[in-house]
Amino acid sequence: QKEVEQNSGPLSVPEGAIASLNCTYSDRGSQSFFWYRQYSGKSPELIMSIYSNGDKEDGRFTAQLNKASQYVSLLIRDSQPSDSATYLCAVRFAGNEKLTFGTGTRLTIIP
Amino acid sequence: ETGVTQTPRHLVMGMTNKKSLKCEQHLGHNAMYWYKQSAKKPLELMFVYSLEERVENNSVPSRFSPECPNSSHLFLHLHTLQPEDSALYLCASSHTGVGYGYTFGSGTRLTVV
């Protein structure tokens, strides 16, 4: 069974600090990785994608991928109360069209 | 309209009713998906359509019946549902290929009474 694992949280971070969200996956051959943000009662929204080892930055968000260790992380700098949401990690395993989602990490930014 | 549109946003139905959920995408994508999201569970993939052909059915009970008449429209027909089927049903679309993420619709909050 190919899996994506996340700590469900809740993760509480003070406003202005760095929030760090982690995700591990079971299939070493996985090719593409995505982070989604889901506000309560809303649908998931794609915020980052990463395909190669290393870091990818987009504004306050940085995705980090380490294929050897099979983990992907999301850093949110200068956290804002509006960043409070559940963050879903999604992985496309090798040879498969579909995305497999983790259970999500609930993040709360404390003013 | 842009993006992925789902209707209705909310649906309450009895266990003997028949209803349909509708999804429409305006993004030129060629794959569409139905997901179920229940509290404290990961997103559960139900059906995948690629180029209008069903390519995956994740052991979904037959009381859920998908239909994809063209690459822009996807339906989920519901009949004789159970209370445990109450959940948020999400439609998504994407280009095919490993580099593409999904765009989700707003979802239909379904309550079976």
Image: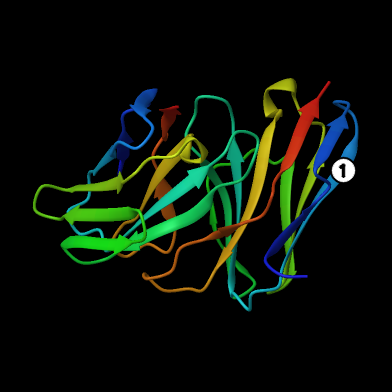
Classify 10 Å Cα crowding around label 1: few (below 14), some (14-19), many (20 and above).
some
Query: Left or right of A87: which side holds B44?
Result: right
Residue at 65% across, 35% down: A41
The residue under label 1 is B19
Does residue A9 appear in this view?
Answer: no
Query: Left or right of B33: which side holds A72?
Result: left
Quarter of the image with the N terminus of chain A in it: top left
Q: Is mark 1 on a helix, strand or loop?
A: strand
Compared to residue A104, the image places residue A62 above or below, namely below
Residue nearest the observer in this picture, A86 or A81: A81
* Residue farthest along the bottom direction in this orientation: B28
Residue B1's x, y, as percent?
Answer: 78, 70
* Residue farthest along the left direction in this orientation: A68
Give the image quarter of residue A34: bottom left
**Which color scheme did the rendering employ for the protein?**
rainbow
Does residue B74 appear in this view?
Answer: yes
Query: Left or right of A10: which side holds B15?
Result: right
Compared to residue B36, the image places residue A9 above or below, namely above
Residue type at tag 1: Lys
- Chain ID, mark 1: B
Residue A98's x, y, as percent?
Answer: 44, 58
Residue at 80% across, 44% down: B9
Compared to residue A99, the image places residue B37 above or below, namely above
Residue A90's x, y, as percent?
Answer: 38, 50
Quarter of the image with the C terminus of chain A in it: top left
Residue nearest the observer in this picture, A109 or A9: A109
Residue at 88% across, 26% down: B14
